[in-house]
Image (spheres, rainbow, N blue to C red):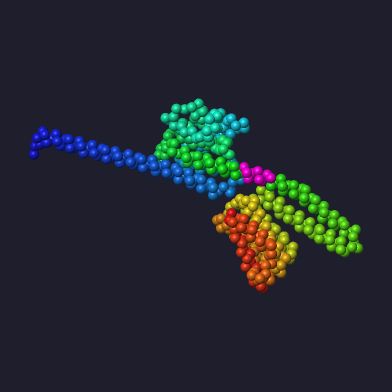
């Protein structure tokens, strides 16, 4: 059926109206999809940033040097934050220049250039301590131009690293384009908070490692002084006591006193040896702790004619143990062994070491006379000291005993 001109015009208007509505609807949907994609990608970057922080914090106890920490930190950022380049820069002596110390994402020719690069720092960067964001729309300052040309990257965030509110370096997060073509995650102002969080974490951990290094140097000095001075003087006392015996052969009372002095001196020397071991940062691993404990146990108990069974697991990883933890752990086990020798009347001692992902457990069992815990406490003040040491580590100490049943002491500490 033929339509009149008026009807055709009306139908064309309706068609144009519906076409406009469809265009508006599809455009709105596409716009929303883009917005949701952008939001999702920003969230992904933040989530990855949190994962990096958590991973580095979990493994922090393994790092004894800053270069180990920096290497793992930059590798995680480079691989998980969808960046083309990442650079760690440190302040050069004099505080006027930043020099790259570690980087990821550059080719061999660029690596050579970065090795010989230094960035003169403007005073406002040091004073304001604010991150710098540069993309294609940025009107560059002379310093931003220097960073762009020196680090060979067009789009970047440069975040200052702070220690005691002073700039000691910077982190450079760079992309050749403004967004990653695979992940479509842009480098934008919204990323700066996450980058500053990462910078704050690496600064805090760097400061902890530096403090640990200072403490280790001081421990080395104390251990050396104890060995060279106190140890040597105590050895002289012991030798002198032995010589004096021949001069007082007819005086059994004096001979007895000299024997007591010599025995006490030997005990002090032995204790100093234990302290020197604990102070030495070379011994700050789980493997060293358990090896030293095993050696001490056999030497001490066999000297008192006790049979020893020592079971310890095979270590899959050699974890770092803090000075405080290894000292407390060793001294508690040493006190337990001392009480066995002094009070238990045992013939056999069994020590079992076990590990969980974050706990170190030790069970010391003897076949001695045992005691009633509610009525008799053979540990005396030693028990209070042991419990205090274990409490300071956040651990647990339990004692089980009965007359004629021997004694079992169990301790568990987090590490």
Q: Which residues are magenta?
A: 210-218
| Quarter where residue 305 is shown | bottom right
Name the residue: 87% across, 61% down: 254
412 in relation to 183, above or below: below
The residue lying toward the viewer, choosing from 349 and 182, is 349
332 in relation to 19, above or below: below
The image position of residue 265, as x and y in percent, is 79, 56
290 in relation to 123, above or below: below
* Residue at the far bottom in the pictured view: 404
22 inside magenta stretch: no
The residue lying toward the viewer, choosing from 122 and 360, is 122
Can see residue 24?
Answer: yes
The image position of residue 141, as x and y in percent, is 48, 27
Name the residue: 59% across, 56% down: 394
Name the residue: 17% across, 37% down: 14
Name the residue: 77% across, 51% down: 231
The image position of residue 393, as x and y in percent, is 61, 55
Can see residue 112?
Answer: no
Q: Main secondary structure of the magenta part?
A: helix
> Is the C terminus in the top left, top right, bottom left or bottom right quadrant?
bottom right
The image position of residue 114, as x and y in percent, is 55, 32
The residue lying toward the viewer, choosing from 250 and 105, is 250
> Is the N terminus in the top left, top right, bottom left or bottom right quadrant?
top left
| Quarter where residue 364 is shown | bottom right
């Amino acid at each position: 059926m033929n339509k009149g001109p008026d009807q055709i015009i009306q139908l064309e208007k309706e068609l144009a109206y519906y076409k406009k509505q469809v265009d508006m609807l599809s455009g709105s949907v596409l716009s929303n999809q883009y917005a949701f994609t952008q939001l999702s990608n920003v969230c992904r970057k933040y989530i990855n940033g949190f994962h990096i922080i958590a991973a580095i914090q979990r493994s922090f106890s393994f790092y004894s040097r800053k270069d180990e920490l920096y290497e793992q930190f930059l590798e995680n950022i480079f691989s998980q934050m969808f960046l083309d380049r990442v650079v760690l820069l440190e302040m050069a002596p004099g505080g006027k220049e930043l020099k790259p110390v570690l980087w990821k994402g550059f080719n061999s020719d660029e690596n050579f250039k970065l090795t010989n690069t230094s960035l003169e720092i403007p005073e406002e960067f040091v004073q304001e301590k604010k991150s710098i964001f540069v993309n294609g729309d940025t009107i560059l300052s002379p310093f931003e131009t220097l960073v762009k040309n020196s680090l060979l990257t067009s789009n970047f965030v440069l975040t200052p690293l702070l220690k005691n509110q002073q700039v000691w370096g910077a982190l450079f997060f760079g992309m050749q384009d403004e967004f990653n073509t695979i992940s479509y995650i842009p480098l934008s102002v919204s990323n700066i908070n996450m980058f500053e969080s990462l910078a704050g974490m690496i600064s805090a951990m760097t400061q902890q490692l530096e403090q640990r290094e200072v403490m280790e140097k001081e421990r080395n000095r104390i251990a050396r002084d104890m060995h060279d001075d106190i140890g040597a003087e105590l050895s002289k006392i012991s030798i002198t006591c032995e010589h004096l015996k021949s001069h007082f052969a007819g005086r059994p009372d004096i001979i007895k006193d000299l024997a007591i002095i010599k025995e006490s001196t030997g005990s002090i020397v032995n204790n100093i040896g234990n302290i020197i071991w604990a102070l030495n940062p070379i011994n700050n691993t789980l493997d060293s702790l358990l090896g030293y404990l095993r050696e001490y146990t056999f030497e001490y108990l066999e000297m008192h004619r006790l049979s020893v069974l020592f079971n310890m697991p095979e270590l899959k990883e050699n974890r770092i143990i803090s000075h405080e933890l290894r000292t407390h752990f060793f001294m508690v086990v040493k006190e337990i062994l001392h009480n066995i020798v002094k009070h238990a009347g045992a013939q056999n001692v069994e020590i079992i070491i076990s590990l969980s992902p974050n706990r170190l457990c030790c069970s010391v069992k003897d076949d001695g006379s045992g005691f009633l815990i509610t009525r008799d406490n053979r540990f005396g003040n030693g028990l209070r000291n042991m419990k205090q040491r274990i409490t300071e580590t956040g651990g647990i100490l339990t004692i089980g005993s009965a007359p004629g049943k021997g004694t079992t002491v169990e301790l568990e500490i987090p590490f």
